Image (spheres, rainbow, N blue to C red):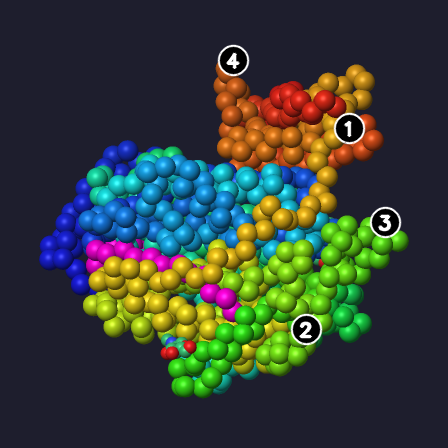
Amino acid sequence: MASARRAPFSGLLAALSGLILLLATSVSAGPSVPFLNPRAEGDKYLLGVGKADITGPVVEIGFAGYADLAQKGTGLRQRLYSRAFIVGDVNKPDDRFVYLVLDVLSGDTAMRYGILESLEALGDDYSAYGSHNIAVTGTHSHAGSGAWFNYLLPQITTFGFDKQGYQAIVDGAVLSIKRAHESLEEGYLDVATAEVKDGAINRSQFAYDNNPEEERNKYEDSVDTTMTLLRFQRASDGKDMGVLTWHAVHATSLLGNNTHAAGDNKGLASWMLERELGGSGNVADGFVAAFGQANHADTSPNVLGAWCDDGSGQECDFERATCADGTVEACHGRGPKFEALDLGVSSCHEIANRLASAAREAYDSLGSSSTPVVGTSVKAFHFFHDMTFWDFQLPDGTAAKTCPAALGYSFAAGTSDWPGMFDFSQGDSGNPDANPLWEAVKGLLKTPSKEQKACQGEKPILLDVGEMSKPYPWAPNIVDIQAFRVGQFLIVTSPSETGTMAGRRWRDAVAAEAKSFLDDEPIVVLGSPANTYAHYVVTPEEYDVQRYEGASTLYGRHSLDAYINLTVSNVKYLSPDATDLPDPGPKAPDNREKSLSFITGVVLDGRPSGYDFGAVRTQPETSYSIGDDVKVTFQGANPRNNLRLEETYVAIEKQDGDTWTRVRDDSDWFLVYTWRRTNGFLGHSEVDVTWETGGNAEPGTYRVKYYGDRKSLGGSITAFEGTSDSFELS
Ligand SMILES: *[C@@H]1O[C@H](CO)[C@@H](O)[C@H](O)[C@H]1NC(C)=O
Ligand SMILES: *[C@@H]1O[C@H](CO)[C@@H](O)[C@H](O)[C@H]1NC(C)=O
Ligand SMILES: CC(=O)N[C@H]1CO[C@H](CO)[C@@H](O)[C@@H]1O
C-alpha cells in the first residue's frame, strides 16, 4: 500500500484530537474502555452503516453449502445478519454505492431482485439506489438454511425454493440499507491491513502448484493472508460508525454435520468485534463490523490439514484428497480445535477469534499506519453479461472463449472441508428417502452438445447445467460484472467463489487500469460470492488440474480471463470524469415465481395433555459453576410459525432485586436453541435451551425464557412463552 498525500497540518490536528480523546478516556476509564482512534484524514464522504436480522427458518430446511441432504436445520446458535455500508459523494449525492455483507452462502439473483424491488417501493428517498450501485455479497457461511437460490441446481438439496426464508433475507437486507441510509452523515474513510498467518490454509495446493513458478515465487503463501479494513468515521464527533473488512477464508469451520444456524467464523468474528468496539468511544449501539469474503475458493479454515477419519492416521492424498478406500468420503479437514469433536464449534470460535484479533490489530494501527481515502468522487457500475460461447481476446491477442455453465466430475467429490454427497443423483423412486425435486427433474438432464464439450476442454462434463433450462435454468449463464470506487479504493465483486491466484491476477489487472486516472496508488479488494451464485473461478492453469475448484469453474478454462476482460474494459466508468454507465446487458432470468418446491409447511402444533405450550419439561439445576452448560427443556412449537426477526426465541434473564433483565438472546454465540419433534403425527415438539456459561457468563441469579408461536389446525398462530425456575451461577 502506498502512502497517500496528506493535507498540511492534518497530522498535527489528528495528534491533538487523539490526545484530547486520550485524556477524555483516562478520566472516564472503566476496565473495558475501548481504544479511541485518532481522526481519519483524507476527503469527506457521505457515510452510513446498518445491520438487520435475516435469520430464515432454522428447522426442517436443508442448509446451503455442503449439499448434504442430511444437513437439515434443528435450531439456532447465532442469528444471521445483513450488514450494509453506504458510501456517497458529498457533492453529488446520487453517486453512491451500497456494499452488503450477508451471513449466508452467497449473494444471489433472486434476493438481489427482491432487494431492488423493495428499495424501489420505498420511493423517492431511495431513488439513488439501483442495480448499478448495490453489491449483495455473502460471508459464505455453510450453516444457514438454503432454499432461497434463483437457479435449480442449488435448490435440489433443499427440495426447492422456500419463500419464507427468501423473504427474511430480502426484508433484513433492505432494513439494513434503510438503517444505513438513515445514519448517513459526512465522514472519513481510511484503510489499514493486518496479516492473518494462521487463519487459512490452501486446500487445493496441488492445483495451485500448477501456476507458473515465477508467479508463485512472488508470494510468500499459497493463500492471501492480508486482511484489509476500511473504517467509517463520521465527521461531526469523530466517532467510528463501523468497519468493513475483506479476508479470504472459507466459512466452513462448522462442519457438514452441524445443524444449528450460525454465521460461521465470519459472522462470529463480527459479533466479537461489534461487542468489543461498539460503545463509548464509538457509535454506541449501531457500530457495525463486517467480515466480507474475498478470494477464498481454495482456502480452508481447517488449518491443521486434511486427514483420513478411517483409523489409518494418514493425511488425505495430496493430489486427489482420497483415503485408503480410494474415495474422499473419509477425508476431513481439521480445524484448530478438532479434538473437541463438537461439529466444529470450538474450531469456529478459534478461527473467529483469529479473524477478530486481526481486524482489531488493523483497527488499532489506524492513524499511525493507515492510508486515508482521498479523491472526492464515488463511482459504481454493474451490468449483466452472457457467458454462453462468448469470444474475446486475451491481453496478448490470443482468441479465447467462454462456454455455457458446466460442472465437471470432481464437483461431485466435494472437498476436504466436507466430502461431496451428491446423493441427490442416486435417489431412485422406489426409495423412501428419494429426493422429490430430483425425481421431478432428473429426466431433464441433457448430454452436452459437441460445441460445449469442445469449449469446456479439460473438463469432463458431469452436469451440463448451462444447457439445461427446463423447467427453468439450472445455473447462471448470465453473470453480474460490477465494481465500485471511492477515492483510490476500488471494490471488484465476483459472482464466483474466486481462487487465491485468480483473485491476485484480477486485482492486479484492475489496479493497473485504474492507475490511468488516479493520482494515488489504487487499493483494490475483491468481494465474493456476489450478486448471483456462479460456483467457482480459478486460473486456467488450475482449471487444467480439474480438482473440485476447477471442475466447478463454470464457463471453461478462460472464465477468469473473461471476468478480468469485462471488469478492466469497464473500469473507465469509475473514473472521476465518468458521467454514464455501461449498457446494463441481458437481464438474468428471474426464477422466483417458477421455482419448484417440495418443502412442506407446518401443519399444526400439538402438546401432550398436562403440558401447556411453554411448560418447562426439564428445569435447570439450582446452582452451576461458570463453565457448566445450563440445560432447560420446554414444551415447544415449530419455530417456522414465526421467524421472530429482530427478536429472539430464547433469552437469559438476570435477577436484580425484584426485576429480571434480559442479558442474553439469540444473537449470543453461547446460547443455543434446539428444536425436536417428539410426535410427528400429533405435532408435539420440545425445545432444548443450552447456555454454555464457559463463554462469557458472569456470576448471578438467572432464569431461562423461551418464546414460541403455535399453529392451530385452522391455521391461526398464537404466541406463548415459557419461564424456567431461577438458578445460581457462581
Ligand atoms: C461430525 O463430523 C466430524 C468429521 O467427520 C466427526 O469427527 C464428528 O464425530 C461428527 N460429529 C457427530 C456428532 O456426528
Ligand atoms: C476484451 O476483449 C475484447 C475483444 O472481445 C478486446 O477488444 C478488448 O481489448 C479486451 N479487453 C481487455 C481489457 O483485455
Ligand atoms: C500457506 C498454505 O496454505 N499452505 C498449505 C497449502 O496446502 C497444503 C496441503 O494441504 C498445506 O500443507 C500447506 O500448509
Extreme-right residue of the structure: 430
Query: What is the CA distance from the residue labelled 2 to the residue labelled 3?
Result: 31 Å
Labels 1 and 4 touching (C-beta < 8 A): no
Q: Name the residue under label 2.
A: 448
Q: Mark 3 points at which residue?
A: 432
User: Dot 1 lies on which element?
Assistant: strand
Badge 4 or badge 3: first in the primary sequence: 3
**Residue 105 at x, y percent in the picture:** 56, 53
Mark 2, mark 1: which one is toward the viewer?
Answer: 2
Which span is picked out in magenta?
363-387
- Quarter placement of the C terminus: top right
Query: What is the CA distance from the residue labelled 4 to the residue labelled 3?
Result: 55 Å
Label 1 residue near ligand 1, CB within 8 Å = no
Badge 3 or badge 1: first in the primary sequence: 3
Disc 2 residue type (three-letter): Pro
Badge 2 or badge 3: first in the primary sequence: 3
Disc 3 residue type (three-letter): Pro
Extreme-left residue of the structure: 8
Query: What is the CA distance from the residue labelled 1 to the residue labelled 4?
Result: 34 Å
Label 4: how many Cα within 10 Å (few below 14, some 14–19, many 20+): few
Q: Which mark is residue 658?
A: 4
Number of numbered labels in the structure image: 4
Labels 3 and 1 touching (C-beta < 8 A): no
Label 3 residue near ligand 1, CB within 8 Å = no
Labels 4 and 3 touching (C-beta < 8 A): no
